[in-house]
Amino acid sequence: MQTFSVQDVERVLRLSRSTIRGLIKTGFVQPARGPKRQLLFSFQDLIVLRAARALLEAKISRRRINRSLEDLRRHLPEQMPLSGLSISAVGDRVVVRDGKNHFQVDDGQYVLGLDVSVENGVIRVVEHKEAVAESAPAETADDWFDKALALEDTDLKAAQAAYERAVELEPDYVGAWINLGRLLHSRHDEKKAEIVYRRGLQECGANPVLMFNLGVVLEDLGKIDDAIEAYQAALSEDPNMADGHFNLARLYEAQGKEQHAIRHLGQYRRLVSTSDSR
C-alpha cells in the first residue's frame, strides 16, 4: 500500500503542519508509524484529511463531520484509482464518484468539492470553492486552535487563552478541550483541568481521550475511585486504548484487586504486542 509522509501531505493538500496535527489530535485520522516512528498516511488518510478541513470550514457540526468521514473512509478504495475521484455536494448529500460509479455519504448541507487525480504517478488534489458574497470571518475556531498550537512552545498563557477562544466559538471542538485540559494539567492546575475535561464531555459527548485524561487528573488529585471510573468509561468507548488498561491495572494492583489488575495488564500487553508487530 502506498504511504505518504507529513511533507507529502503538506505539499499535496496544502495544509500547514499545525493543521495536520490538529486534525490528527481531533481523531479524524490515525496515521501509521514508520520504522523511525515517522507518521505515514494512506491514500484514504489524505482524502479524509482534506474533506475534514473543507467540512470544518463549512461550519458543519463535528458530530455530523465524524459520521460523514467514517462513511467516506468505508467507501474509499485503498489505492488511488487511475480514473480519479470527484467528491462534491449534490443536493443534501456528499457524493463520491469513482469513474462512472458514485455513492452518497451521510446527509446534510455540505460545501465540498474535491477532484483527485493521478498525474505522472503523483496524486493531485484540487478543491473547487464557490464564490461567496461576503468574505469569511477573519478568525474561526480552527484559526484559534492553530494559534494555540503554535504558542505552546513560547507562551502557555496565550495558548490557554487561544484554546478558550476556540471552544467559545465552537463548544463541541473536542481537540481544543483536550489540549486546554492538557495545558492546565502541565501547569499543575489539576482542579481547573478537571473542570475543563468535564465541560468538554458535556459539550462533545463520550470521548475516550477526554475520559482518559480526566482519569489522569483525578489520580493526581487523589480521587482514585473517580479515576478508575473515568478509565473504565474511556475503555467502554475504546477497548483498544492500551494506556487505559495499564493505568487500571496499576490502580487495581494498589488496591489489592489482583484479578482485575491481571486482566487489564494482560489486555495492555496484548495491545502493545499487536501494535509493535505491525
Image: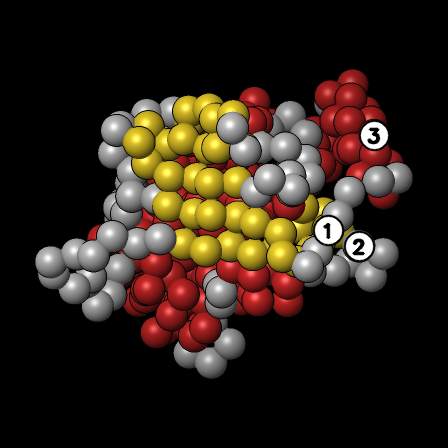
> Residue shown at 57%/49% (left/top)?
117
Q: How far apart are the two marked residues, 2 and 1, measured between alpha carbons?
A: 10 Å
Task: Give the foreground label among 3 and 2.
Answer: 2
Task: Evaluate if marks 2 and 1 touch, with contact meaning CB atoms under 8 Å apart.
Answer: yes
Q: Nearer the viewer, mark 2 or mark 1?
A: 1
Residue at mark 3: 270
Percent position of residue 13, x then y: 51, 59
How much space separates mark 1 and mark 3, taking CA atoms? Answer: 26 Å
* Mark 2 Cα-neighbour bin, 10 Å: few <14, some 14–19, many ≥20: few
Q: Earlier in the sequence, mark 2 or mark 1?
A: 1
Q: Residue visible at 43% across and 39% down?
A: 87
Residue located at (35% from left, 53% from top): 128
Q: Is residue 169 above or below residue 247?
A: below
Quarter of the picture containing the C terminus is top right
Looking at the rendered image, the quarter that the N terminus falls into is top right
Disc 3 is placed on an element classified as helix
Q: Is 74 situated left or right of 247 in this image?
A: left
The residue pinned by badge 1 equals 3
Task: Specify the amino acid type for callout 2.
Answer: Gly
Look at 64% across and 26% down and name the residue there.
239
Q: Quadrant of residue 265?
A: top right
Q: Where residue 34 is drawn, which disc sits there?
A: 2
Residues 51 and 103: in front is: 103
Residue type, label 3:
Arg
Residue 95 in sight in this render: yes
**Circles 1 and 3: CB distance less than 8 Å?**
no
Q: How is the image coloured?
A: secondary structure
Residue 3 vertical position relative to residue 10 in the rendered view, above or below: above
Q: CA distance from mark 3 to mark 2?
A: 20 Å
Is 128 placed left or right of 175 in the picture?
Answer: left
The residue most toward the top is: 259
Residue type beneath disc 1: Thr
